[in-house]
Image (cartoon, rainbow, N blue to C red):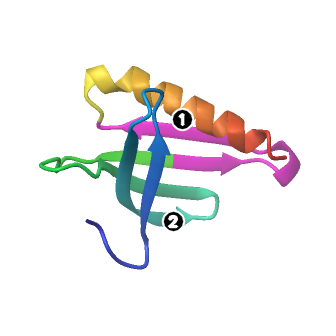
Amino acid sequence: MTKGPNCFVVTYRSMDGSEKRFVGSYKVSRRGKVQFTWRRDAFGETSSSLVRIRLQGDFERTTVNLKHVGLAQEEQSHYSTLWQASLEKLASLF
């Protein structure tokens, strides 16, 4: 498992009730930009993908640009749905 000051673990429950975990590390590259590695925390899984996030605009009118690269073709739809739901939930907090 990834360890260190810039590391994280994300745990969520999928629609079938199973719990999933992702681990990664992040780097803030400059104001308004962050990127991080993203890997399933599962036995034998070693490949990771890269998520890039850029925030543009003022606080009240911020646009979030998110790009998740390095995914297998069969995973792209799943992660697109996951990110969309996550961003919608985040937006509902404001």
Q: Which residues are magenta?
A: 53-70
Q: Is residue 23 left or right of residue 87?
A: left
Q: Residue furthest left?
A: 44
- Closer-to-camera residue (26/9): 9
Q: Is residue 55 left or right of residue 20?
A: right
Q: Residue at x 69, y 34 (%)?
A: 88
Instruction: Give the percent coordinates (x, y) of residue 47.
Output: 19, 47
| C-alpha separation, residue under disc 1 versus residue under disc 2 | 19 Å
Instruction: Give the percent coordinates (x, y) of residue 81.
Output: 51, 25
Q: The disc labelled 2 sits on which kind of residue? A: Val
| Quadrant in which residue 85 is drawn | top right
Instruction: Assess whether residue 54 is covered by the magenta stretch.
Output: yes
Badge 1 is on which residue? Answer: 83
Instruction: Give the percent coordinates (x, y) of residue 7.
Output: 40, 68
Badge 2 is on which residue? Answer: 28
Rendered position, 37 above or below 72 = below
Secondary structure state at the residue bearing disc 2: strand
Crowd band around label 1 with a 10 angstrom C-alpha radius: few (<14), some (14–19), many (20+): some
Task: Count the labels in the image.
Answer: 2
Instruction: Assess whether residue 17 is covered by the magenta stretch.
Output: no
- Closer-to-camera residue (76/18): 18
Rendered position, 75 above or below 37 = above
- Closer-to-camera residue (69/87): 87
Q: Residue furthest front?
A: 17
Residue 50, numbered circle: none
Secondary structure state at the residue bearing disc 1: helix
Of the image marks 1 and 2, the number of the one nearer the N terminus: 2
Q: Residue furthest bottom?
A: 5
Crowd band around label 2 with a 10 angstrom C-alpha radius: few (<14), some (14–19), many (20+): few
Instruction: Give the percent coordinates (x, y) of residue 33.
Output: 57, 56
Give the prevailing secondary structure in the magenta stretch. strand
